[in-house]
């Protein structure tokens, strides 16, 4: 009887162990074991991520993703998404990290984790030269285009409640809307404005006012301290070596702030 009981308990224990899911390693170990890193980036953003003349992904965010994969010694799998899908993609673990001109904000930090800043951008309101706009209050009753789920969208929604806000799914669609005359006023970033004016032709849109200067972080799932530490160390190393600033300047024709590493995440 005792022998049968012992065998029965052993069988139950074995069945319990088999039913348990396999223990998951941390994200950094998983990436190294898989031999590849899935990096999400928002395509259609001038200078940051776009399709070049050879129909290949290019831009500072794409190059940053390549540099990270090279430093890890793994292959790069580029996950191309829209601006609106940036945070959800990381929350759903559809990518290991996100390098997609995503500004570090308190609201986003509730959903995903961020590294120290790796780049910056200025968001602005722009419009025709003869339209007098100096602040949000001047947007009352006016039609302004924004890219959905961006800081631009949030700031215009909060500060210009009486404006007619037209939301587009990505920067490429917003650029087309300006070029085709669907909107005259936009809240965007300086790199996108340059692309708008190039495609629009004729009288260019002017910067009316700067809404905010933003620090951009690499986003990753929460509770992945080893991956975050590796990325923070990578940014610090590549910034101090000059590789990251040189690459950024190649695309944006401007320098990264000298105090970038001292800014809080």
Image (cartoon, rainbow, N blue to C red):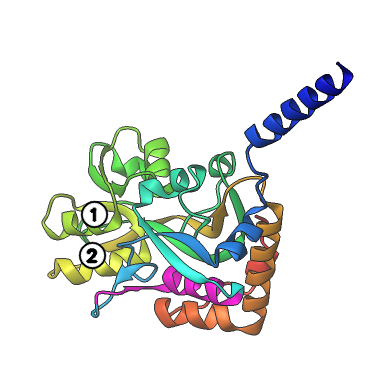
135 shown above or below 42: above
Q: Nearer the viewer, residue 87 or 37?
A: 37
Q: Position of residue 164 (x, y in %)?
A: 24, 37
- Magenta stretch contains residue 5: no
Q: Residues within 10 Å of mark 1 (few under 14, many from 20)?
A: many
Quadrant occupied by the C terminus: bottom right
Range of residues picked out in magenta: 55-71
Give the dominant element type of the magenta stretch: helix, strand or loop.
helix
Per the model, the C-alpha gap separating discs 2 and 1 is: 8 Å
User: Disc 1 marks which residue?
Assistant: 174
42 shown above or below 243: above
Q: Which mark is residue 50?
A: none
Q: Secondary structure at mark 1?
A: helix
Q: Position of residue 67 (x, y in %)?
A: 53, 76
Q: Does label 2 or label 1 sit earlier along the sequence?
A: 1
| Quarter where residue 140 is shown | top left
Q: Nearer the viewer, residue 208 or 55?
A: 55
Q: Residues within 10 Å of mark 2 (few under 14, many from 20)?
A: many
Q: Residue at x 38, y 44 (%)?
A: 149
Q: Which mark is residue 196?
A: 2
Residue 34 in sight here? yes
Q: Nearer the viewer, residue 4 or 203?
A: 4
Residue 259 in sight here? no
Q: Nearer the viewer, residue 47 or 192?
A: 47
Q: Residue at x 68, y 30 (%)?
A: 15
Q: Are marks 2 and 1 in contact (CB under 8 Å)?
A: yes
């Amino acid at each position: 009887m005792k022998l049968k009981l012992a065998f029965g308990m052993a069988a139950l224990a074995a069945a319990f162990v088999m039913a348990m899911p396999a223990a998951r390693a941390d994200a950094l170990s998983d990436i190294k074991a898989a031999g590849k890193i899935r990096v999400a980036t928002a395509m259609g953003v001038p200078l940051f991520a776009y399709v070049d003349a050879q129909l290949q992904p290019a831009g500072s965010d794409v190059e940053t993703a390549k540099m990270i994969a090279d430093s890890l010694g793994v292959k790069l799998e580029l996950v191309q998404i829209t601006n609106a899908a940036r945070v959800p993609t990381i929350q759903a673990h559809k990518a290991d990290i996100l390098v997609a001109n995503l500004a570090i904000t308190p609201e986003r930090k509730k959903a995903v984790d961020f590294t120290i800043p790796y780049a910056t951008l200025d968001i602005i309101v722009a419009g025709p030269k003869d339209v007098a706009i100096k602040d949000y209050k001047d947007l009352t009753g006016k039609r302004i285009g924004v890219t959905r789920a961006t800081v631009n969208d949030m700031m215009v929604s909060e500060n210009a409640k009486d404006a007619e806000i037209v939301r587009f799914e990505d920067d490429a669609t917003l650029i087309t809307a300006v070029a085709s005359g669907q909107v005259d006023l936009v809240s965007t970033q300086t790199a996108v404005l340059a692309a708008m004016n190039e495609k629009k032709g004729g009288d260019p849109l002017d910067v009316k006012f700067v809404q905010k200067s933003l620090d951009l972080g690499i986003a990753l799932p929460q509770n992945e301290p080893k991956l975050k530490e590796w990325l923070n160390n990578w940014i610090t190393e590549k910034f101090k070596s000059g590789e990251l600033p040189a690459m950024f300047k190649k695309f944006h024709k401007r320098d990264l702030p000298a105090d970038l590493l001292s800014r809080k995440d």
